[in-house]
Image (tube, rainbow, N blue to C red):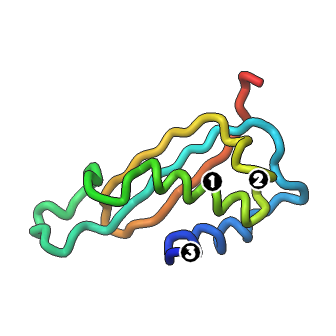
Amino acid sequence: MWTPFHKAVHDEAKLHVPKKPINIAVKLHAVFEFPYPSKWRKAQRTGVHPHTSVPDVDNLVKGIGDMLQQAGVVEDDKFIVAVSARKQYNATGGVFIQLEPDQKT
């Protein structure tokens, strides 16, 4: 079952589907941004802060790979051979994803 996160990633990915799904080794770069917790004081709600609570970053990355495959961006998430990912708090939240060819292949 898809969460709202999975649906949002899938729907956005569908807007960027290439003519032919990617079937070469790629690196995935992802930044997961979460809105500041409501309990934080106004003085704490500035800049970017590490997000150290659930969900785990590895679970978020797995969801990205699955959604990119289901949306038709990548032929199979096995083509994602390297990952860099970060979870953080900021004012608005969002997910930022970049794929680039892996130069080592």
Residue assigned mark 1: 65
Query: Residue at image x 68%, y 59%?
Result: 68
For marks 2 and 1, the one nearer the N-term is 1
Question: Total marks drawn?
Answer: 3
Mark 1 vs mark 3: in front: 3
Task: Give the Cα distance between marks 3 and 2.
Answer: 19 Å
**Looking at the image, which residue is at 46% across and 54% down?**
59
Disc 2 to disc 1, C-alpha distance: 8 Å
Instruction: Name the secondary structure under disc 1.
Output: helix
Q: In the displayed structure, does residue 94 sit left or right of residue 99?
A: left
Quadrant for the C terminus, please: top right
- Say whether disc 1 or disc 3 marks the residue closer to the N-terminus: 3
Task: Give the alpha-carbon distance from disc 1 to disc 3, as whole Å.
Answer: 14 Å
Disc 2 designates what residue? Answer: 74
Dividing the picture into quadrants, the one containing residue 25 is: top right
Vertical order, 26 against 65 (above or below):
above
Q: Which residue is mark 3?
A: 2
Q: Amino acid at mark 3?
A: Trp
